[in-house]
Image: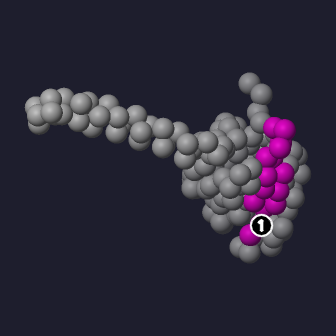
Amino acid sequence: MSVARLRAPLVYLALVGLPVAGLIGVLRAGTGLEAPPAIAGEWVLEAGAASTCAGTERIAIEQSGRFLQVRSATEGSEATEAHLDGARLAATLRPAEGPCAGAAVALEGSFADGVLEGQLSTDACPPCASTPLRARRAVE
């Protein structure tokens, strides 16, 4: 068999076989991956200390995969970066209003069945040092 006759099958394998093999490898590597829960949108804080400490009754979450931006849903509030680890959220709010206005307020919680439950905590605002939090997705 001459080199010219082997050239076409080798080129075919290189241009078709290698990409197909790569695709199969990527699909196998991703079989165990799971998308994070979709939590983007506005969340309504239940009345009480948490809404007072957050300076609002609503928080807004923007999501791209497991990366989030969280802010109070009031005018002038600053968005902060956050992340999801499974169904657990870790974020920092900077309320524009309320007793903790301008202070960094840590928000830690978890999502289940359309409810966010967790804690608000800060050292900069004694009344809100450790405050339970419960929120539901806003219905529009």
Please check the rendered image and state whether residue 98 is part of the magenta-colored stretch, yes or no: no
Q: Position of residue 62 (x, y in %)?
A: 60, 42
Q: Quadrant of the N terminus?
A: top left
Check disc 1 and report the residue beneath it. 121
Q: Nearer the viewer, residue 96 or 28?
A: 28
Instruction: Residue at 88%, 46% (x, y): give it.
Output: 47
Q: Is residue 97 above or below residue 1?
A: below
The structure residue drawn at horizontal position 70% and vertical position 45%, both measured from the top left corner, is: 59
**Figure quadrant of residue 30:** top right
Residue 124, image quadrant: bottom right
- Locate residue 90 relative to residue 78 in the image: left or right: right
In the displayed orientation, state which residue is furthest to the front.
Answer: 1
Q: Position of residue 64 (x, y in %)?
A: 55, 43
Q: Secondary structure at mark 1?
A: strand
| Quarter where residue 41 is shown | top right
Which of these two is toward me, 84 or 61? 84
Residue 48 place in picture, x, y as percent: 89, 51
| Amino acid type shown at disc 1 | Ser
- The colour scheme applied to this rendered structure is one colour
Instruction: Evaluate whether residue 93 shows in this view.
Output: no
Quadrant including the C terminus: top right
Please report the bounds of the magenta region as a residue range.
108-122
| Main secondary structure found in the magenta portion | strand
